[in-house]
Image: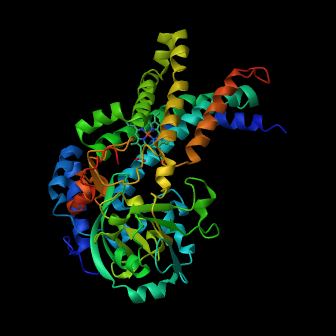
Amino acid sequence: MDFVTPINSAARRVPIWPLYILCALPPFWFLYQGLTGGLGVEPIKALEHRLGELALQFLVAGLAITPLRRHLGVNLIRFRRMVGLAAFYYVALHLLVWLVLDVQILGQIWADILKRPYITVGMAGFVLLLPLAVTSNAWSIRKLGPKWRQLHKLVYPAVLLGALHFVMLVKGFQIEPLLYMGAILMLLALRFKPARRRQFV
Amino acid sequence: MAYRWKNDLTHADVTPKGLFLNRRQIIAGLGAGAILGATGTRAMAQEALKPNSYEEITTYNNYYEFGTGKDDPARYADALTTAPWSVTIDGLVDNPGEFSMEDILARMTIEERIYRFRCVEAWSMVVPWNGFELSDLLNMAGVQSSAKYVAFETALRPDEMPGVAYRVLDWPYVEGLRLDEAMHPLTIMATGIYDKPIPNQNGAPLRLVVPWKYGFKSIKSIVRITLTDTQPGTSWNKAGPNEYGFYSNVNPTVDHPRWSQATERRVGGGLFAGREPTLMFNGYEEVANLYTGMDLAENF
Ligand code: HEM
């Protein structure tokens, strides 16, 4: 039952740059939908929610890549930078929608960032992702050397903050954000578990 | 007594107006940047205070018994059987009993009330309700002098309500008012919207509407009304006592712990809709005397 080899050989053949374009497109589609009624009667919230949810999904996908390789031998490392940058792209657009379409009022933006814990937490997540996005290129990796790996450990607190933000913002007792948080905690915990098979690069 | 309150908002040709606003906002938003667009929208806000469209009112709802998404109620509430329907009125009343909808409607005078509706989540609408004053129903049951509060309960039908499979709230949904709030001429039981029977997602066949309080106080699909002498428990207060008070009057100066209540966004303004200032008691200042001497920040 070797399902790993075909996945790995297929993954090696998929070109990456079209994936960047593919991941960049949905927000434009959402924007079009928002302008033409496709997002319902309150398109601002709908847009904000879709971007937030996709951001979190990309972050989770990014976190899954290392454990997939270590524990199952599925090697998707080639896609990790693309997935991470896509996550950042969605977080940034999510923030932009909040700033420009949702709140709009400058005084309230600052008040909300400082006063509303779920916004503060989301903002902290975004701020932690910033240096990671900026250094997600070959030049930075060379330039920073071993410090690059250290720096990119920031993704762990960033993802946790993103999920916590979701847990904090829902009303009543809702399962969905807890499922994300659970998945993230599991993916993080797997990093402490010794690999089942020999690590191959 | 019907007709104790006169509409201050009027009907207008809603849809063309909505489209017109939309287009202007889009142009303003794209052309001059969203900040400029927002200013323009606010200037137009007063002028735009006309009822939301039937579509807006019936596709963007909070009715967690059918799911937590805003479109879940419109999608799933069809399953709710609303006829036959009866409402039990009990507690401190002279004529307790189970009253059928037909029985109730035969004895009430339906009138139109165009009210602002402000959700605790900082969005708002203007809704042309049809309904009768709650006081008429309570007087029919004969409120005893010892009664001080009114408790309400929503139907709980696991077979028809997919959302109650999840304990988002402690079902059934319950709400409550002080008796003087319940007897106020503004407080109505709605049975229709735009002269049509009220859709299930909006709380068919009978729901409360208290326009100066956050929307969640206006409990839907009511099956029981109980007059009590002690303050009844309310669903959102039980779920988050520091976020949702018993009174929950619309108050721009008392924020929800997680977001500001100073402004609101009218649903239907499109992608570039601006925010408008929220009004004390949602603009229904005539209820202020119900709360004289009360600290409204403490009794939020
Ligand atoms: C790591 C970064 C972040 C992630 C992963 C994230 C994720 C999410 C998710 C999953 C949702 C809920 C979507 C839904 O209900 O379907 C959400 C909602 C929201 N987020 Fe974020 N977010 C992040 C950062 C931010 C930042 C920086 C801000 C603003 C400063 C922000 C503001 C909001 C707002 C206002 C909502 C909607 C709340 C409402 O329902 O009214 N988020 N976010």
Q: Depth check: A64 or B294 in front?
A: B294
The N terminus of chain B lies in quadrant? bottom left
A148 above or below B51?
above
**A113 on left or right of A74:** left
**B35 on left or right of A81:** left
Q: Depth check: B19 or B38 in front?
A: B38
Q: Position of residue B250 (x, y in %)?
A: 30, 54
Q: Position of residue B5 (x, y in %)?
A: 23, 74
Q: Depth check: B40 or B28 in front?
A: B40
Residue at the spot 48% in from the left edge and 81% down from the top edge:
B95
Q: Depth check: A41 or B122 in front?
A: B122
The answer to whether residue A15 is visible is: no
Q: Position of residue B255 (x, y in %)?
A: 32, 43
B110 above or below B153?
below
The answer to whether residue A92 is visible is: yes
Rendered image coloring scheme: rainbow
Question: Number of marks in the image?
Answer: 0
Residue at the spot 38% in from the left edge and 51% down from the top edge:
B121
B126 above or below A135?
below
Give the image quadrant in which the ligand numbered 1 is located.
top left
Q: Position of residue B162 (x, y in %)?
A: 60, 63
